[in-house]
Amino acid sequence: MKCIFSFSILLLTILFVACNNKQPETTKEQKTELVFPKGDIITNNNFTGTAWLKWLVLNDSIFNCPVGNVTFEPGARTNWHKHPGGQILLITGGKGYYQERGKNAILAKKGNVILIQPDVEHWHGASSNEQFSHIAINTNVQNGKTIWFEPIPDEYYNSLKEH
Amino acid sequence: MKCIFSFSILLLTILFVACNNKQPETTKEQKTELVFPKGDIITNNNFTGTAWLKWLVLNDSIFNCPVGNVTFEPGARTNWHKHPGGQILLITGGKGYYQERGKNAILAKKGNVILIQPDVEHWHGASSNEQFSHIAINTNVQNGKTIWFEPIPDEYYNSLKEH
């Protein structure tokens, strides 16, 4: 009887280990969200933290519509900036913020679409604890290049409450 | 001894059932690919088979850039057509075809980006055995509306070889 008990414990241990030996959820999620490449780390001074960019469509005078896949690590965000021709953001993963000058920051997440009117100053980026990715469609670029301003200070960024 | 053997078989059966009681792979994939809604079935005569459309950005005179999420069931495809302002396709799932008039059909799949020059006659759609989805970015729509032509005959479509 003691032997049966020991043997049962052994098999139940195997059952427990086998059923819990799964791929971590985060790895799985990152893999399934990678429809388009992550690209390269952005090295200019218009961002705080680590962000990645892969151009899917380059700028030209036929489409006037460069398209980029942007991924922000947690805590990463753009400086304030504006687009003379406007911009469309298609949020493809994670959770982040979008804010226009003079308004409250809003929480943005996978599946949201954000229309940024021409010449409206704004910033966007990840939340502090989650990655954030979007496709950025730059419209009417024949109207002029993006104009960049100051960074989002840590003090303000860290005060943002997630909903 | 016989008792230990029977008990082992019972526990191993539990182990087997518990570890194989997973969600089917296809369901999981469909769920992870649904970043944007599938929308409604397209009911006009410009398509063969069943295709779905969700407008992510409506047409307006500020962005000049309506954006749609299009899903083709296996075998579904557009008629021949052209865009006076051009179009960009970001392939987000599955496998399908893209063809320009006078050229061979090319196979398109998840992660591909297709630039359709203004006024080039073309069609796109799913392969015969797999769903196909893309984000369609309609550029420079101030240059005019999409012009539609004849459908892709079954005989020709069924002759296409998948690479």
Image (cartoon, coloured by chain):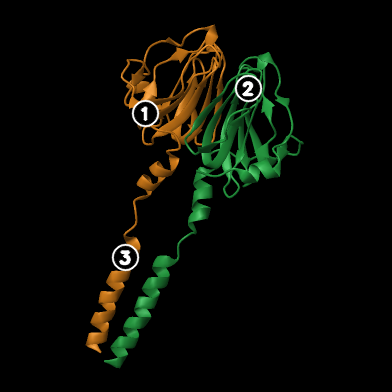
Chain colours: A orange, B green
- Marks 1/2 in contact by CB < 8 Å: the verdict is no
Residue located at (51% from left, 15% from top): A102
Residue B101 is situated, as x and y percent measured from the top left of the image, at: 63, 28
- Tell me which amino acid carries mark 3: Ala
Q: In the picture provided, is B147 more to the left or to the right than B18?
A: right
Using the rendered image of the protein, determine whether residue A119 is visible from the camera's viewpoint: no
Residue located at (33% from left, 26% from top): A40
Q: Quadrant of the N terminus of chain A?
A: bottom left
Q: Are marks 2 and 3 on the same chain?
A: no
Tell us which disc is closer to us: 2 or 3. 2
SS label for mark 2: loop
Residue located at (54% from left, 7% from top): A143
Q: Which mark is residue B120?
A: 2
Chain of the residue on which disc 2 is drawn = B
Residue highlighted by disc 1: A39
Residue A94 vertical position relative to residue B148 in the rendered view, above or below = below
Residue highlighted by disc 3: A18
Q: Which mark is residue A110?
A: none
The foreground one among A57 and B106 is: B106
- Tell me which amino acid carries mark 2: Val
Residue B133 is situated, as x and y percent measured from the top left of the image, at: 57, 39
SS label for mark 3: helix
Q: Are marks 1 and 3 on the same chain?
A: yes
